[in-house]
Amino acid sequence: MRPKLTFFGLLLLCIAGLLTTHSALAFPPLPSSFYGTVKVNGQNVPDDTVVRALIDGQVYAESRTQTYQGNSVYNVDVKGNDTDTPEADGGDANSVVTFEVGGVKADQSGAWRSGTNIELNLTASASGALETPPPTLPPVPTQTPIGYIAPTATPALLAPLAAGVGSGSPWLIIGATVMAAALFLVWLVRQRRRT
């Protein structure tokens, strides 16, 4: 009777560990998306002109224009601020999003709102040429080398598990599940030996 109590006590401890780590796995908010036409000096801009989305002067997203039904258009997703990190890395509710078209500040701005897709037609005035990024060349395909893992590298495979303990990572959940399964198997073997 005593081994059953020990097993179920350890099993409850593992389940409690799983439940407490679940709340630590938070997801960042959905992005705020903006789309629309792009005109500089009342004219379309060349394809691949960079449109940047900024919050407080920091660039959080960019895209390139293309021509659609005779108009220059853009579409950009501005990610949300992940509150699990100390530094700002996206928008918060009602952050003001400003835009640049080819390095020139657009006349329009928008409010960041999680999970929205807002039509915002951008216009700007420029006295000179717009910034044009260098063309992006397609990557050159390469052969991926096949490596050999030495037998002494086995402890390194357990490093992510050791690093994840106490941080609420999925490795902790996996470790607790494996431990619970191992305890159950030990209990099952002991029960079969007794019968």
Image: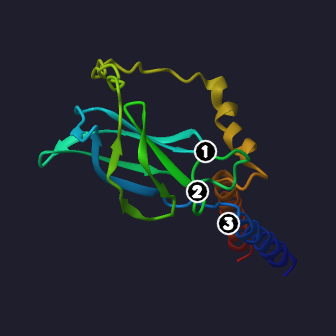
Chosen colour scheme: rainbow
Residue under label 3: 22
Mark 3 to mark 1: distance in Å? Answer: 33 Å
Q: Amino acid at mark 3?
A: His
Q: Amino acid at mark 2?
A: Ser
Quadrant for the N terminus, please.
bottom right
- The label shown at residue 56 is 1
- The local secondary structure at tag 3 comes to helix
Considering only order in the chain, which callout, 3 or 2, is on the residue closer to the N terminus?
A: 3
- The label shown at residue 134 is none
Q: Amino acid at mark 1?
A: Asp
- When asked about the image quadrant of residue 2, the answer is bottom right
Whether label 2 touches label 3, CB < 8 Å:
no
Q: Residues within 10 Å of mark 2 (few under 14, many from 20)?
A: some
- The local secondary structure at tag 2 comes to loop
Residue at 59 percent of width and 63 percent of height: 93
Rendered location of residue 160, percent (x, y): 67, 40
- Outermost residue toward the right? 2
In this rendering, would 21 be left or right of 62? right
Tell me the mark number nearer the camera, choosing from 2 and 3.
2
Residue at 72 percent of width and 47 percent of height: 164
In this rendering, would 133 be left or right of 55? left
Rendered location of residue 23, percent (x, y): 69, 67
- Viewer-proximal residue, 65 or 19? 65
**Relative to 114, is 108 above or below?**
above
**Relative to 192, is 151 above or below?**
above
Considering only order in the chain, which callout, 1 or 3, is on the residue closer to the N terminus?
A: 3
Mark 2 to mark 3: distance in Å? Answer: 29 Å
- Viewer-proximal residue, 40 or 58? 40
Residue under label 2: 95
Whether label 1 touches label 2, CB < 8 Å:
yes
